[in-house]
Image (cartoon, rainbow, N blue to C red):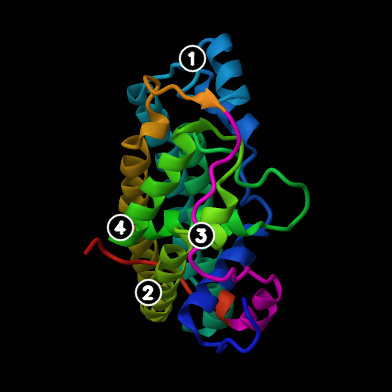
């Protein structure tokens, strides 16, 4: 982010949370390992090999099969995050300073986990292909849009569709960097980040209150997580499954990554923002019903 940004700016706050969560252990999904494991019970070895080397769509794996696998992954991640959320709600009010940050962190991390799994099933490229903790700007941008889709924002739906359209025109091995960081998609990334930052702050208060009553707090906390995480994951699944990128009938001529038209000056996701927003990173949790 540019220097001089207000610390409490919702967009900056969201980017800091997302960047920090992406660095947590166990959050990043290894694309090859996940596809091999997820497809094993449903596809031939040749289909699996081609899905990994190219995409599940290129391997001819139908959306119906991918939907079954996606639902399995959603159930797994939902059960896991709900159980962890309930456990974090048990101690009660004396443990609030410890449990709220832990619960928020694991929730955002599990949102990232299911977003990656669904993306890989529906033929998006590796989002964390580089070694180390760094997250490039295009990945930050597309993850922000995925979160926006999960929250039901129309602008994120439009933007994800545009990015998928760019990639479906060619066999792209990477995300369209220019479009997501300083091109035609970037304004929608910023708009989604600002909205998500506001929503995350609102929900952190609601979730904190639920933990104030021991045992009852566990039920409420786990229930809130189940009631929000599951529909959000299904919303992203439905949107990604409906894009041409996931359709095995779609074929493209191999080429380079498509970039978008430059419409405004680039503003990168500076890792230093995470330090500036460290306190916020551990005190937020996203929930929001579909408008």
Q: Which mark is residue 183?
A: 3
Looking at marks 1 and 3 on the same chain, the residue that comes earlier in the sequence is marked by 1
CA distance separating discs 2 and 4: 16 Å
Q: Is residue 277 magenta?
A: yes
Residue at disc 4, secondary structure: helix
Q: Residues within 10 Å of mark 1 (few under 14, many from 20)?
A: some
Image label count: 4
Q: Position of residue 180 (x, y in %)?
A: 52, 56
- Do the residues under discs 2 and 4 have CB atoms within 8 angstroms? no
Q: State the residue position of label 1.
A: 43
Q: Which segment is the magenta one?
A: 255-279
Q: Main secondary structure of the magenta part?
A: loop
Q: Position of residue 30 (x, y in %)?
A: 65, 38
Q: Which mark is residue 227?
A: 4
Asked whether the viewer can see residue 109, the reply is no
Quadrant assignment, res 274:
bottom right
Q: Which mark is residue 199?
A: 2
């Amino acid at each position: 982010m540019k220097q001089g940004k207000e610390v409490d700016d919702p967009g900056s706050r969201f980017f800091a949370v997302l960047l920090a969560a992406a660095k947590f252990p166990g959050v990043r999904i290894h694309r090859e390992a996940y596809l091999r494991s997820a497809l094993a019970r449903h596809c031939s070895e040749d289909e699996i090999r081609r899905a990994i080397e190219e995409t599940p769509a290129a391997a001819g794996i139908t959306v119906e099969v991918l939907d079954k696998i996606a639902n399995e992954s959603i159930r797994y991640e939902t059960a896991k995050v709900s159980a962890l959320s309930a456990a974090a709600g048990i101690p009660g009010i004396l443990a609030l300073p410890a449990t709220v940050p832990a619960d928020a962190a694991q929730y955002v991390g599990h949102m990232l986990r299911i977003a990656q799994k669904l993306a890989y099933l529906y033929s998006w490229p590796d989002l964390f292909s580089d070694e180390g903790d760094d997250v490039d700007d295009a990945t930050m941008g597309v993850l922000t849009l995925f979160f926006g889709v999960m929250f039901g924002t129309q602008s994120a739906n439009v933007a994800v569709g545009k990015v998928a359209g760019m990639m479906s025109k060619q066999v792209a091995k990477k995300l369209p960097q220019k479009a997501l960081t300083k091109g035609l998609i970037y304004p929608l990334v910023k708009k989604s980040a600002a909205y998500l930052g506001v929503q995350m702050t609102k929900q952190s208060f609601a979730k904190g209150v639920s933990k104030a009553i021991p045992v009852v707090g566990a039920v409420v906390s786990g229930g809130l997580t189940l009631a929000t995480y599951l529909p959000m994951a299904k919303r992203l699944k439905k949107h990604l499954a409906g894009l041409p990128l996931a359709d095995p009938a779609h074929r493209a001529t191999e080429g380079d990554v498509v970039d978008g038209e430059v419409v405004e000056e680039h503003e990168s996701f500076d890792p230093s923002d995470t330090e500036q927003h460290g306190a916020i990173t551990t005190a937020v949790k996203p929930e929001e019903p579909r408008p």
